[in-house]
Amino acid sequence: MIAIIDYDAGNLTSVERAVRFLGEDCTVTRDLDLISNAERVIFPGVGAAGSAMESLKKYGLDKALHEAMKAGKPVLGICLGTQIITSFSEENQGTQCLGLVEGEVLCFPDDMKSPDGEKLKVPHMGWNNVKVLKDHPVLAGLKPEHQFYFVHSYYPMAKEAGNVLAQTEYGLTFSSVMGRDNLIATQFHPEKSGKPGLALLKNFIAWKP
Amino acid sequence: MLSKRVIVCLDVRDGKTTKGIKFKGNVDIGDPVDMARIYYEAGCDELVFYDITASHEKRGIMIDVVRRVAETIFIPFSVGGGISSVEDMRDVLLAGAEKISVNSAAVKNPKIITEGAEAFGNQCVVLGMDVKKVEKSEKIPSGYEIVINGGRTYMGIDALWWAQEGERLGAGEICLNSIDADGTKEGYELELTALISENVNIPVIASGGGGIPQHLADVLKEGKADAALIASMVHYGTYTIPEIKEHLKSQGVPVRDQLQ
C-alpha cells in the first residue's frame, strides 16, 4: 500500500486517481501508523511552503517523513512536496524545510526572457522538457522529447551535483528531479503529465532502492 | 523549452457536450468524458469544461462529469461556468479538476479571486474575461470593454485594467475570450491578445475565433499568447490535434509531441 501524505495541501486526489489507475492500492492519509506501515510514501501537494511546514509539524508528519526516509522506504516528492524536502525555501519570508536533500528553493526572477527574447511569465506553467543527468530506475524509459506538466513560481536547486537527477530550463536551469538513496522528487506533476508521467509513477511503484 | 499549449474547450449542458454560435442555440455533440479521452489520446495539452447548465439544481451532474473525467485523463483540466463561491470552487477541485475559472462572478464580486487564490493557490484560479471592442474613451482607454451575459451586458470596465487587477487579486492565469471573434472561425483577436499578454505577468490563453491551424500560429506568435483554446475546429473533425500541432511546429511554435 502507498501512503499519500495529507497535510491540507491542495489537489491530492489527482495523485490518488493516477496511482489507482495503475492498479496500485493507495490512501490519502495523515495517520502516522498507516504511514509507518505503508510500503511506499508519496509526498505531493500544491500551495505555499510556510503553511505546508506548519501543517506537517502540527500533524507530526515531518517526523513521519524523516522516519520513512531512515527506514529505507521509497519516497516520492511531487511539486510542493519536492520543495519541502530541501533545506530552505525563500517562500513566505523564508521557510526552514525538512532537509532530506540539501538544497534551497528560490523565487523565479521577474525579468526572465526566453532564448528568442520573449518575456517568460511566472508561474512557470505548462509542458517542459526534463533533461536526465543520471540514470535512475524511476526515470527509466524517459526520452529527451518527453515533456512534463509544471506549475510553480519557486524552483528547487540541489546543493550536491550528485543529487540532481534531471534539470529543466526556464529562464535559468533548475533541478527538476532530485534524489538520494530511497528518495526521488520531481518538481513537475507526473500525475498530470499524460503517458510519460504515468510511466514514471509506474516505475516508482516497482522501485526497490 | 516550455511548449505553447493547445487547449480544447467543451461546453457542457446537463451532462452533454454542446456547441452554440455566439450564445444562440446549442446542439448536443457528445459525451464529455468520451470526448475528453479522445482528445487526451490525441495529444491535447489541457482541457476546459464550461458548464452552461442553466439551473443550479443540476450542478451535481457537472460534478459527476468532472469526477469521471479525472478518472479517465491524466492532463490538467479546468472547469468554468456557474462558479460563484469558494464552496463551488472546492466542489469542483475535490472532484478532480486542476483549476477553476471565474468570469462574470469575478466581475460582480472581485474578492472571489483572492478568496480562491488564498484557499487553493493562485495556480488554481483562472480569470475568464469576455471582451468586446469599443470606441476608446476616458473610461475604456484600451478600447476593449468587459462584457457579461454572452456579450449582452457592457460593464463599463476596461479589459486591460481588469486583466492587471485580476493578476493583482491573485489569478494565476487569464482566459481571454473575444466576443467579436467567437464563433466566426476567422482568427483570434490578435491585437487584444497581444495587448493583454504583454501587460500581465501571468499566462494568457487566447479564446474565440480559431478556425484553421494558422490562426493558432498567429495568436501564439504575433498575439503573444501562451496557449490557444479551440472547440469547433476539432469537435466536427475538421482538424485533428496532431494536424494542428504539426502545423504549429512547421511555423516554429514550440509544441508538445504526442508520444505513446
Image (tube, coloured by chain):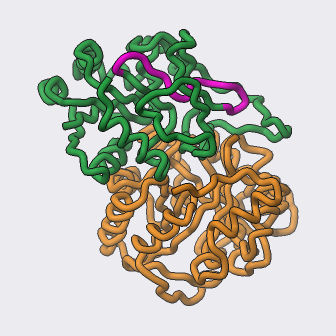
Residue A78 is left or right of residue A165, and the answer is left
Q: Is residue B198 magenta?
A: no
Query: Can you give x and y, in whole percent of width and height, for residue B216 in the image?
Result: 75, 64
Q: Residue at x 47, y 23 (%)?
A: A83
Residue A75 is left or right of residue A117, and the answer is left
Question: How many numbered tags mark residues here?
Answer: 0
Q: Residue at x 52, y 62 (%)?
A: B47
Query: Can you give x and y, in whole percent of width and height, for residue B155 in the image?
Result: 67, 65
Of residues B75 and B142, the one drawn nearer to the viewer in this rendering: B75
Which chain is tinted green?
Answer: A
Res. A159 in view: yes
Residue B178 is left or right of residue A175, and the answer is right
Quadrant the N terminus of chain A occupies:
top left
Per the rendering, the colour in which chain B appears is: orange
Q: Please identify the dominant SS of the magenta region.
A: strand
Quarter of the figure with residue B19: bottom right
Of residues A94 and B222, the one drawn nearer to the viewer in this rendering: B222
Query: Can you give x and y, in whole percent of width and height, for residue B56 in the image?
Result: 35, 72
User: Does B36 appear above or below A192?
Assistant: below
Quarter of the figure with residue B153: bottom right
Quadrant the C terminus of chain A occupies:
top left
Q: Please provide the residue range marked out in magenta.
A: A169-182
Res. B192 in view: no
Q: Residue at x 68, y 69 (%)?
A: B243
User: Does B35 appear above or below B218?
Assistant: below
Of residues A148 and B7, the one drawn nearer to the viewer in this rendering: A148
Of residues B42 and A172, the one drawn nearer to the viewer in this rendering: B42
Q: Is residue A172 magenta?
A: yes
